[in-house]
Amino acid sequence: MPFDWEADFYAATDWDRGAYVGGEDMPGHLETFIERVDVPDTVADVGCGPALVDFELAPRYPQTEFYGYDLAPSVVEANREHAAEAGLSNVHFAVDSLPDLAIDREFDLVYCMATLYFVDDVERALAELYDRVAPGGHLVFNYPNRHTRTWVREEAPAHKREAFERVARGENLLSYDAIEAVIGRRPRSYWTAVGARDETYATRRSPAVFVRKPAPA
Ligand SMILES: C[S@@+](CC[C@H](N)C(=O)[O-])C[C@H]1O[C@@H](n2cnc3c(N)ncnc32)[C@H](O)[C@@H]1O
């Protein structure tokens, strides 16, 4: 049976409001990125999970609207309740899933972290994410590559192998060249851009990148 995020994780465990890659550092990294490029009016976090980044940044950027999307209804509902309890009116959540997003609008920043590992047809998912970026905006994401695959097959703890089965089979691996072939833009390292190059999670098996969508001339 394929890994089911709703049944096998959110409904079955006492999950924490953390971030899967980079943990507590991730809100600060996105803040660094935002300050470097431009403060966005709108952010979409696709595969948001517990949405640590959105919950940390929403109070710091009250003029920015944060939208979290995830395929697991229970984490979406828990996030809505948390936003209401925290009195945050600029964070919103909805169920949606890659590779075919139902969201029919653009955002200044589209963020997708620790999610493409679990998605079928990663090229279509990447095209969908880029399609939701407004002209002049940015897409930030991480992805599985051939080094991630080696890690899953040779080092990953047994309990993670089921969730990473597509990576183990090599079905959804990307590279800078593959990304450029899909969206027509060469990605740049997000870890470098936010000064995280030396962090333990910024390994070659966990690349994180960004691209800017050109604004019309
Ligand atoms: C490892 S968690 C990462 C959560 C968060 N982005 C982070 O960085 O911690 C992966 C999340 O992706 C969601 N997910 C898995 N497959 C997805 C898909 N096809 N479309 C949207 N979300 C998906 C899961 O429900 C889960 O919340």
Image (cartoon, rainbow, N blue to C red):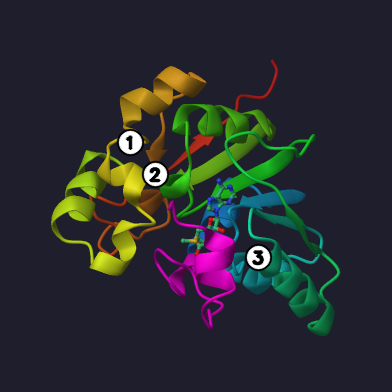
Q: Position of residue 77 (x, y in %)?
A: 75, 69
Numbered disc 3: secondary structure: helix
CB-based contact (under 8 Å), mark 2 and mark 1: yes
| Magenta segment includes 27 | yes
- Residue range in magenta is 1-28
Question: Could you tell me residue 209's position as x and y percent?
Answer: 42, 43
Q: CA distance from mark 1 to mark 3?
A: 27 Å
In the picture of the structure, the residue carrying the numbered disc 3 is: 54
Left of 130 or right of it: where is 202?
left
Of circles 3 and 2, which is in front? 2
Q: Residue at x 84, y 78 (%)?
A: 84
The residue sitting at 54% across, 34% down in the picture is 125
What amino acid is labelled 3 in the image? Asp
Disc 1 packing (10 Å; few <14; some 14–19; many ≥20): many
The nearer-to-camera label among 2 and 1 is 1
| Residue indicated by mark 2 | 143
Quickly name the residue at label 1.
173
Looking at the image, tell me whether mark 2 or mark 1 is earlier in sequence order.
2
* Residue at disc 2, secondary structure: loop
Q: Is residue 200 visible?
A: no
Residue 42: percent from left, percent from top: 75, 49
Q: Is residue 12 left or right of residue 107?
A: left
Q: Earlier in the sequence, mark 1 or mark 3?
A: 3
